[in-house]
Image (cartoon, rainbow, N blue to C red):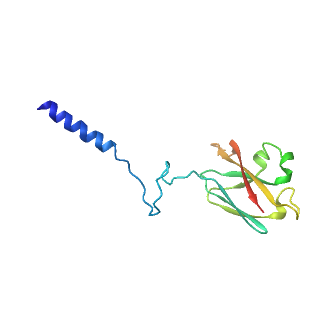
């Protein structure tokens, strides 16, 4: 009797573990491994003659925008603590003419960006890799 009860409990426990929860969005797509959760990024949109950058990360980000043809001379790290900064949730509009190396013949730009860590005294220090987002102008 005891063996039968333990067996029944084991079968119920295994069947409960076999059921995974999924998010149903009505699109008949298979669920993705991250279930719709995406890490924040710097969202870049181009609508002539302006680039719009929106910080969706949980950090202050530094950024530099360089014409695609000028990337071979861009310095790494691009500007350290002197980069333009964008706080969490903020958005900025940057005219094409403010893109480093921009000319009327420019067709693409790269937005180089990275996150800052804030020290206890409030100072910001660049952290992590430099991300690059290419955008068509």
- Name the residue rendered at 43%, 56% in the picture: 23
Q: How many marks?
A: 0
Against 44, residue 14 (above or below) is above
Name the spot of residue 71 as percent of width and height, x first. Answer: 83, 49
In x, y percent, where is residue 76?
A: 79, 42
Q: Quadrant of residue 15?
A: top left
The relative height of residue 84 versus residue 76 in the rendered view (above or below) is below
* In the image: residue 23, left or right of residue 78: left
Q: Nearer the viewer, residue 53 or 2?
A: 2
Can you say which quadrant of the picture contains the N terminus? top left
User: In percent of the image, x 85 and y 46: which residue is there?
Assistant: 72
Horizontal and vertical percent position of residue 80: 77, 45
- Asked where in the image residue 95 lies, by quadrant, the reply is bottom right
Q: Extreme top residue here?
A: 3
Q: Quadrant of the C terminus?
A: bottom right
Please name the residue shown 62% across and 43% down the image. 120
Q: Residue at x 82, y 53 (%)?
A: 68
Taking depth in this image into account, of 42 and 12 the one nearest to the observer is 12
Q: Is 23 situated left or right of 67 in this image?
A: left
| Of residues 41 and 58, the one drawn nearer to the viewer in this rendering | 41
Q: Seen from this angle, which residue lies furthest bottom?
A: 48
């Amino acid at each position: 009797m005891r063996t039968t009860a333990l067996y029944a409990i084991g079968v119920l426990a295994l069947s409960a573990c076999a059921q995974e929860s999924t998010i149903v969005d009505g699109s008949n797509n298979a669920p993705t491994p991250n279930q719709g959760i995406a890490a924040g990024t710097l969202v870049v949109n181009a609508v002539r003659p302006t680039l719009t950058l929106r910080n969706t990360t949980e950090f202050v980000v530094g950024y530099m925008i360089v014409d695609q043809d000028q990337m071979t001379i861009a310095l790494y790290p691009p500007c350290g603590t002197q980069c333009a900064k964008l706080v969490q949730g903020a958005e900025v509009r940057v005219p094409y003419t403010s893109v480093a190396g921009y000319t009327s013949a420019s067709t693409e730009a790269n937005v180089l960006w990275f996150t800052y860590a804030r020290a206890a005294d409030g100072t910001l220090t660049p952290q992590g890799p430099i991300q690059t987002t290419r955008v068509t102008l």
